[in-house]
């Protein structure tokens, strides 16, 4: 946050950009006759364009998250937000982003697509931030540091004091990806947005909410940062059906909370069972809906599980995850089948 100046961080062409103004941007409110968007006039569920800024979804989210609706960006998965953040703040062939591997792969891919250099400061052996290394490696061209907490694929939360240290010392954006935060208790950093103008938080409907197929991701930040993302996004980036189903889901938070409770109790059982399998060397502590498991011959176990119709994620070639598989918590039946199959291979 030291010397944080948003307008200096943004790419100049984006700052100067006059965004596309859609028909639905220019007229807001209710009318009897819409002849402004070249739509087919015959009514169906989908003959009209969706609300470009998804206000109904955002108003519900704003209440639940304790922020203003203007502090929310919604996109085609959180992946859209990751890509937009890079495109808004990083000048191709000049700027860089920092990542802390092993972590979610999309930060690296989005940076590569946009010709943005990657500074990779590995996590420590216990999968925490090397804060000294991060702060030493950052340059004035480092525009974004991506942190993932709970981290994928390791499953652990990052220490809050480390995240705060980086928020305090780094002059660029700190993006905290909270895709798995619902599994970690009520500890989102959203409440810190008012203290840190350089904080950006990502969440998603794809995990705890059980709506991966909808493709809806959330980004929370200052109104100024969100306005920049809105300027660059495709005009109608979230379709009508997705907006409707998100509203339906948000009106039934209990359903999500119940799923989380069940998954967490299943995780405990699965971890206990995994620890009894002789070739499993370590089940890493998890704050998410998956566990990272180190074992002898991980790749060959992965193949054998696959032959039995069970697909897990082979992370054995990932730095600091050598010989590990990442296993998502399934239903009780699925988890039993996994354990029985592991015992038999
Ligand atoms: C699954 C996941 C996401 C979610 O991506 P969507 O595009 O919203 O489905 C984001 N970040 C991390 C770390 C993830 O594991």
Image (cartoon, rainbow, N blue to C red):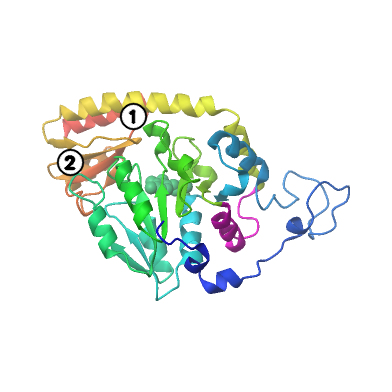
Residue 236 lies within the magenta run = yes
Left-right relation of 56 to 178: right
Which span of residues is magenta-colored?
Answer: 223-239
Within 10 angstroms of label 1, few (less than 14), some, or many (20 or more) residues?
few
Above or below, comparing residue 143 to residue 311 in the picture: below
**Element carrying mark 1:** helix
Residue at (44% x, 69% y) in the render: 114
Nearer-the-camera pick, 310 or 256: 256
- Sequence-wise, which precedes: disc 1 or disc 2? 2
Residue at (72% x, 61% y) in the render: 22
Residue at (35% x, 27% y) in the render: 264
Q: Which residue is mark 2?
A: 294
* Residue 57 rendering spot, x and y as whole percentages: 63, 41
- Total marks shown come to 2
Q: Which residue is mark 1?
A: 334
Nearer-the-camera pick, 228 or 209: 228
Above or below, comparing residue 56 to residue 133 in the picture: above
Residue 148 lies within the magenta run = no
Left-right relation of 61 to 116: right
Q: Residue furthest right?
A: 32
Q: Quadrant of residue 99?
A: bottom left
**Element carrying mark 2:** strand
* Residue 263 rendering spot, x and y as whole percentages: 38, 28
Nearer-the-camera pick, 145 or 249: 145
């Amino acid at each position: 946050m030291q010397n944080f100046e948003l307008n200096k961080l943004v790419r100049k062409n984006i700052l100067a950009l006059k965004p596309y103004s859609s028909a639905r941007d220019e007229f807001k409110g209710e009318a009897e006759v819409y002849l402004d968007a070249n739509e087919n006039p015959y009514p169906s569920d989908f003959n009209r364009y969706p609300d470009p800024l998804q206000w109904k979804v955002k108003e519900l989210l704003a209440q639940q998250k304790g922020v203003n609706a203007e502090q929310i960006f919604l996109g085609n998965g959180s992946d859209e937000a990751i890509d937009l953040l890079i495109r808004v703040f990083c000048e191709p062939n000049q700027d860089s982003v920092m990542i802390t591997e092993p972590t979610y792969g999309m930060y690296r891919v989005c940076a590569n697509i946009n010709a943005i250099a990657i500074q990779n400061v590995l996590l420590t052996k216990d999968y925490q931030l090397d804060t000294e290394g991060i702060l030493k490696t950052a340059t004035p061209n480092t525009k974004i540091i991506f942190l993932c907490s709970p981290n994928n694929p390791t499953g652990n939360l990052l220490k809050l004091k480390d995240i705060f240290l980086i928020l305090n010392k780094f002059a660029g954006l700190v993006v905290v990806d909270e895709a798995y935060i619902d599994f970690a208790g009520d500890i989102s950093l959203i409440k810190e947005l008012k203290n840190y103008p350089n904080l950006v938080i990502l969440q998603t409907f794809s995990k705890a909410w059980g709506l991966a197929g909808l493709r809806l991701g959330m980004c929370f930040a200052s109104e100024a940062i969100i306005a920049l993302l809105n300027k660059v996004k495709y005009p109608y980036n979230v379709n009508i059906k997705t907006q409707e189903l998100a509203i339906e889901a948000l009106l039934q938070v209990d359903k999500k909370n119940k799923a989380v409770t069940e998954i967490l109790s299943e995780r405990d059982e699965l971890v206990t069972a995994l620890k009894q399998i002789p070739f499993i060397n370590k089940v890493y502590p998890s704050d998410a809906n998956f566990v990272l498991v180190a074992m002898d011959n991980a790749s060959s176990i992965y193949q054998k599980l696959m032959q039995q119709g069970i697909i897990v994620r082979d992370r054995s070639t990932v730095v600091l995850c050598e010989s590990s598989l990442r296993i998502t918590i399934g239903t009780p039946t699925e988890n039993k089948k996994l354990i029985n199959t592991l015992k038999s291979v």
